[in-house]
Image: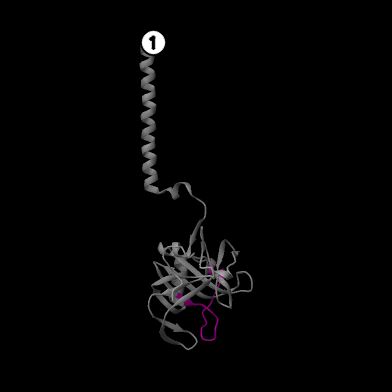
Amino acid sequence: MKRIIILLTIFVLTLFMTSCENKTKNDENYDSLGASEIVDESPHNYTLSEYLKSGKTLILYEVKSSEIIEKDDIIYNIIIFKDNLVSEYISTDNPFYTVKTTVSEIEKMTDEEIIEFCEQSCETIVTNIEYQFEVYTDGTGNYTDHERIVSLNEVSKFNYLSRENYYDYYYLNLFNNYYVNTTATVYDSTFYMLPSDSERCVGRWYRPDGYILSLDSPDSDNVIVDPE
């Protein structure tokens, strides 16, 4: 009987030690990879400032379209956020500029190829400027009416109509009350829409690649609320 008890005790201790060892290895694996890389494979939802402040690349396309983005729509402007800087390029068929591209052509490119295309073939409005997020509230002061991305200082801007450079603040208006959660699929790419104040565009479209963006709220981090 005593021998059986000893053997049972050794067996229980062995199981306990194995369990502790596996737990330690799992903890190390969890710490090295991060929780999201292990358990979260769903699309991520970010506010605009959350996503861009992390230094990720985001490319917006201004498209002349009546209701929804289509493969033959011409992309007028391309706005690139990269490494916490923003650049904007003209890609249009206006009388002063002949280079143009369509949604279907962009769909075939990687982000790196799009950036290279802009730098080599498009007219630059602004390039690599620092910016901040400005949220303007509605009448209650609790909700976002619209959001702007504004350069920290005056920058050199190019007017493609007059063909001249001038100095001014760069800003990009994003209106919350125009927001429609619209998506469109062109070939294998899905595009989402951010709101826009532009009359010629339904909105500013982006290819999400596993994430979904929304405008910031007044209590978001990294935003200035109702600046004077």
Q: Residue at x 43, y 48 (%)?
A: 35
The residues colored magenta run 88-106
- Kindly state the secondary structure of the residue where label 1 is placed: loop
Tell me: residue 218, above or below residue 4: below
Q: Residues within 10 Å of mark 1 (few under 14, many from 20)?
A: few
Q: Position of residue 38 (x, y in %)?
A: 45, 47
Q: Residue at x 48, y 68 (%)?
A: 59
Q: Residue at x 39, y 48 (%)?
A: 33
Tell me: residue 164, above or below residue 222: below
The residue lying toward the viewer, choosing from 123 and 179, is: 179
Q: Position of residue 45 (x, y in %)?
A: 50, 58
The residue lying toward the viewer, choosing from 90 and 15, is: 15
Quadrant in which the N terminus appears: top left
Residue under circle 1? 1
105 drawn magenta = yes
64 drawn magenta = no
Question: Tag 1: residue type?
Answer: Met
